[in-house]
Amino acid sequence: MENRKKLALNIFWTILYAIITLFLVLHHEIWADEAQVWLLSKNLSVFGLFEHLVQEGHPSFFYLLMMPFAKTGCSVFIMQIFCWLCACAAVFILLQFSPFSRFEKTSIILSSGFLYFFPVIARSYSMIPLLIFIAAILYKKQKEYPVFYAIILALIANTHIIMFMFSATLGGYFIYDNLIKEKQKNKKNIISAALVLLGLFAVILQLAATPFGKSCAIKYDLHNFVQNILSTFTQFFGFSFGASSAAMLMFLGGIFLTLLVYIFLKDKKLFSVALSGILFQLFIYITSYSLHIYGTKSFCALLIILFCFWQIEQGKYIKIILSIFFLMSTLYGLSFALSDVFNNYSSGKETAEYIRKNLPEDSVLIPIPEPYALSVMLYLPDRKFWSGTHSKYVNYMHWSCNAENNKSFVFDYRNVKEKNIYFIVSMPNPYIDKIFNGKIEVLFQSKPSIAEGESFRVIKYILNE
């Protein structure tokens, strides 16, 4: 009877969570990063996708899941619903199967990650809580369900590159404990070890060339190492907790280290899992993503912390510290949620509607700069977009930037044969008037957007007589 009551209550709270977050999803407007996933899945073949993702720096798992829906003409809303469902399933597993106290569970669900980032932003990150929570359940049952556990580890590694070392460390321990140490080789364990290795190898095979490629989006740079560390530290907590002052950043950093120390004192193996997983993430951020660490990224490190605390006995005070740590992000997540309801996350849809109603169907649209206009591109699938950087028509973002093709759009647009040429200019862009020498007519200006750089002006260039 008690178990049924618990199950019914947890189903109720999950449904309530689902309703609230679905309301946010329905008000969320697709922005550039989300649009790129859908556009790649729609316009590339499987082999073309593998070739392109070297530029993106992401494994293919999420893209392959979306590809059948994108290619059969489904709305991008399918991707949003999929990510929302993953977050809802993760919340149910947390409520029903985790060993955390009620206060801890509540604080985790109300954190900015679960209140907003994971259910609302439609990216591969949304799958990570669900997969990590399943792995947390299986961690102490890996001898009973080795194949299932191995599959989950392989999938986690293939959600995002930042989860690679977390999966690799757990996979390494699994292989050592269940295969190398065992004198009698169990067939299931051999298969499971092979699955783990195949999952890790798949990531390496897909992305090994990324650091050595010619992508403008991913640049591994150690020249500003100290500055990148400071930027990473600031954004790591800033984009999850809304922390802006140095004192708050230090306070949050202190709590984070306290949680790691507690894991170290309780279980050295789990500490090595947490340390390797988090340090690898920080390495990626510092060397490449130091300017773009949004809440979904940094919250993946907090999920690793949760995985470890799922396995160890917690004292009274550490439960309070862990709960307060997550609750400190609630107001920031709530502010994001309310902003998304009452404002444009991106102005891509609004800009696309203006273009559809007011510009000729044979118009050629030239985005400046190109990446920010991906949301406009998503909402205008039948219009032509010209890449000034690559001197060709495009239907998704090409990140390659060879010196030969990295020319100014001012010259390259002249290769377009159509007469109706318009520019979609990301704001703020104070240099646009200088570039065109004032020979422009601003036709439309969108409302401000939450996503940086995704408010737009539609501009007509006035050619010389």
Image (cartoon, rainbow, N blue to C red):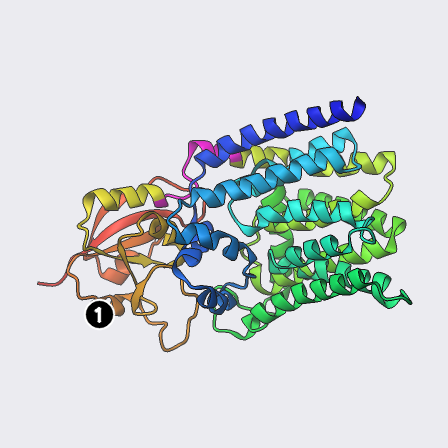
Residue at the farthest right position:
183
From the image, which quarter does the N terminus lie in? top right
- The range drawn in magenta is 337-348
Residue 144 location, x and y as percent?
A: 82, 51
Circle 1: element type: helix
Q: Nearer the viewer, residue 438 or 400?
A: 400
Q: Nearer the viewer, residue 186 or 308?
A: 186
Residue 193 location, x and y as percent?
A: 75, 64
Residue 315 location, x and y as percent?
A: 87, 37
Is residue 455 visible in this depiction of the protein? yes
**The stretch drawn in magenta includes residue 346:** yes
Give the quadrant of residue 367: bottom left
Crowding at label 1, few (<14), some or many (≥20) Cα neighbours within 10 Å? few
Residue name at image x 38 percent, y 41 percent:
448
Residue 71 location, x and y as percent?
A: 40, 54
Residue at the farthest front position:
187
Residue name at image x 34 percent, y 43 percent:
349
Q: Nearer the viewer, residue 153 or 465?
A: 153
Residue name at image x 56 percent, y 73 percent:
209
